[in-house]
Image (cartoon, rainbow, N blue to C red):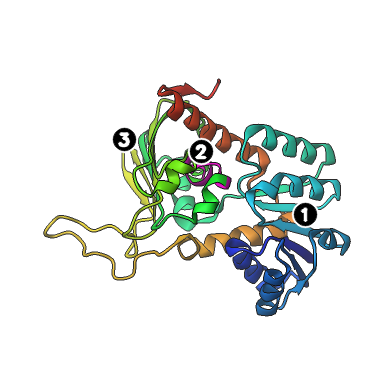
Amino acid sequence: MRIGLIGTGRIGSFHAATLARHPRVDALLVADADPARAAELAGRTGAEAVAEVAAVFAAGVDAVVITAATSAHAALIGRAARAGLPAFCEKPVAVDLPGTLAALREVERAGSVLQLGFQRRFDAGYAAARAAVRDGRLGRLHTVRAVTSDPAPPPAAYLPLSGGLYRDCLIHDFDALRWVTGREVREVYAVGSDAGPAMFREADDVASAAVVLTLDDGTLATATATRCNGAGYDVRMELAGERDQLAVGWDERTPLTSAEPTGPAAPTKPWPGFLERFAPAYEAELAAFVEVAGGERANPCDGHEALRALRVAEACEVSRREGRAVRLAE
């Protein structure tokens, strides 16, 4: 299989290395707005660098992987759809609902395949939690708590392009919440704080956020996120049911210290970032995409799944700005 990868930044480089090792990938072509960066990545992975994005589509590839800047996602998804190529795209489809809907319409008109990169669906802990909910081991869920804490803020230039903390970061929690519980979000109430570096205020974004979500069966969930968690990268989900409780992301590297005299000690090697924490999940989702592109399995996360998570993020942004609960039906 010949695969073209567009965008050779941090996540693009990681995906390129994964694809270069995959036994089903015979050739990997990489392109970037910065040709020198693409050439450097090609030198490290054994891929072939091409001078521009158009060359990827002209090269007769069998599928494309889109890891370019968020602002380019929708156009590249449309281009792949019109070319009849299966596409994998890092979330989001676009930074707003109109752009997302337009891109998904192109995919539907072409009858092509689009898989979105919500890697937590391929993480062993989240998968085990989903199975525990499905088989009834926890009993009726009453509370779910989700946490995403980045150890340090992204570059200031990234913030205005990111879509904000709810769309860029918490959207992973919203997707995982839906996927693990099998329920839809009915209503949200969201708050945010821009306390911290001035770049958040300048970008009209928040550095930390908290959301209360009511699911369609009455289950209550909370989701919190921050860009300023100096202890390390912390991603967890706790599910509390009438029979039992289960925690995802709680291991010897979780950057959490117990205040109890008999509690566990602080981790000696806390998770430094998302690539380290979710490396196996990222590899598994691309392996799934190779099978999807080859017509060997169903799409595990299509564009409509991404749209549902984005609607939750959009509702959170409205809630934060207007200071009220927002129903998803709005």
Q: Which residue is mark 3?
A: 242
Q: Name which residue type carries label 1.
A: Gly
On residue 272, which mark appears? none
Residue 170 on the magenta span? yes
Q: Quadrant of residue 192?
A: top left
Q: Which SS class for mark 2?
A: helix
- Side of 24 where 285 appears, left or right: left
What separation in Å lies between label 1 and label 3 (alpha carbons)?
41 Å
Q: Which mark is residue 178?
A: 2
Q: Is residue 160 among what the camera can see?
A: yes
Q: Residues within 10 Å of mark 2 (few under 14, many from 20)?
A: some
Residue closer to the observer: 177 or 82: 82
Label 1 or label 3, whichever lies nearer to me, is 1
**Measuring 88% from the left and 61% from the top, which residue is drawn there?**
58
Q: Position of residue 168 (x, y in %)?
A: 53, 45
Along the line of sight, which residue is nearer the eye, 32 or 330?
Answer: 32
Amino acid type, residue under disc 3 in the picture: Glu
Spatial separation of the CA atoms under disc 2 and disc 3: 19 Å
Q: Amino acid at mark 2?
A: Arg
Residue situated in front as seen by the camera: 17 or 168: 168
Q: Which residue is mark 1?
A: 295
Q: Is residue 162 magenta?
A: yes
How many neighbours does mark 3 have within 10 angstroms: few (below 14), some (14-19), or many (20 or more)?
Answer: few
Q: Secondary structure at mark 3?
A: loop
Snapshot quadrant of residue 302: top right
282 shown above or below 303: below
Please give the range of residues in magenta.
161-171
Residue at the image point whose x is 53% and y is 41% from the top: 167
